[in-house]
Amino acid sequence: DVVTFSYVGYQSKTVAVSQLTLPNSIIELTPLKNQLDEVVVKFVKPKPKVLGRNSKGLGLMHTNFYTYYEKNVDDRLSKEVGMKFTLKKDCKINDLNFNITSNEFSSLKFRLHFYKIENGLPSNRIVEKDIVFEIKDEFKGWFKVDLKPYEIYLDKETADVAVTIQWVESKKANEKSKYFGISTAKSITETSFYREKAMDSWSKSGQSMSFYLNTMCR
């Protein structure tokens, strides 16, 4: 009869049981040498890339959070709109930018969301950080949300993502304040998303809002 001794990193050794009955028997294992293949690590410098539409267009069309027919703004907080982006490389997100064409509020707070897209619509959030930003004093024009402090990385395997802004709080400039809009254009290649409340179903349309991300990709 024999006994085999083995241990990770050492060559196995088989000895006769009779040898183990000898006084002061010691079984020594020989270290196993593993020759690893050479690995070369190369640094690929990230390059700046703009995802989305960074032009105003003719300024004739707008995506409005509230329309003429909606009487109450305050009771319908949590409206959400955004755009689909396709990732072809691994990217770090530096900032979000959008062009505001109408704004009748002294203060607006929005929450920024990143969603995975499944079956053509936003599904689960892929960035769990709570990103809330404020727009003050009826500001119009290009507005930038600095995202560098949040260290947001999206990889190309995610493919399509939806980036949206959700209305969470507002202060009217006057009692009739209602309108807040972002410039947009009709598109057959771009997709925008919107929903009325946080738990509502998503809808989509062929719109290309002036809504883009500055990224560093590799």
Image: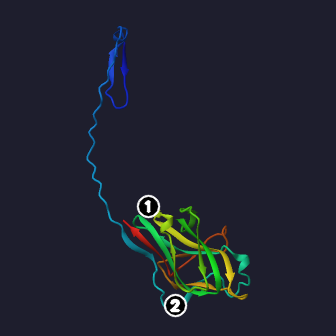
Residue 129 falls in image quadrant: bottom right
Image position, residue 81 (x, y; %): 59, 75
| Circle 2 residue | 59
Residue type at mark 2?
Answer: Gly
Of helix, strand and loop, which one carries label 2? loop
Mark 1 or mark 2, which is nearer to you? 2
- Residue at image x 44%, y 62%? 155
Residue 111 falls in image quadrant: bottom right
- Residue at image x 64%, y 69%? 201
Position of the N terminus by quadrant = top left
Can residue 136 be seen here? The reply is yes
Question: Above or below — where is 110 with respect to 42?
Answer: below
Horizontal arrangement in the rendering, residue 16 relative to residue 72 (left or right): left
Image position, residue 68 (x, y; %): 68, 88
| Circle 1 residue | 157
Q: Nearer the viewer, residue 85 or 31?
A: 31
Q: Nearer the viewer, residue 54 or 106?
A: 106
Image position, residue 11 (x, y; %): 31, 27
Q: Residues within 10 Å of mark 1 (few under 14, many from 20)?
A: few
Residue type at mark 1?
Answer: Glu
- Residue at image x 53%, y 70%? 162
- Residue at image x 46%, y 70%? 94
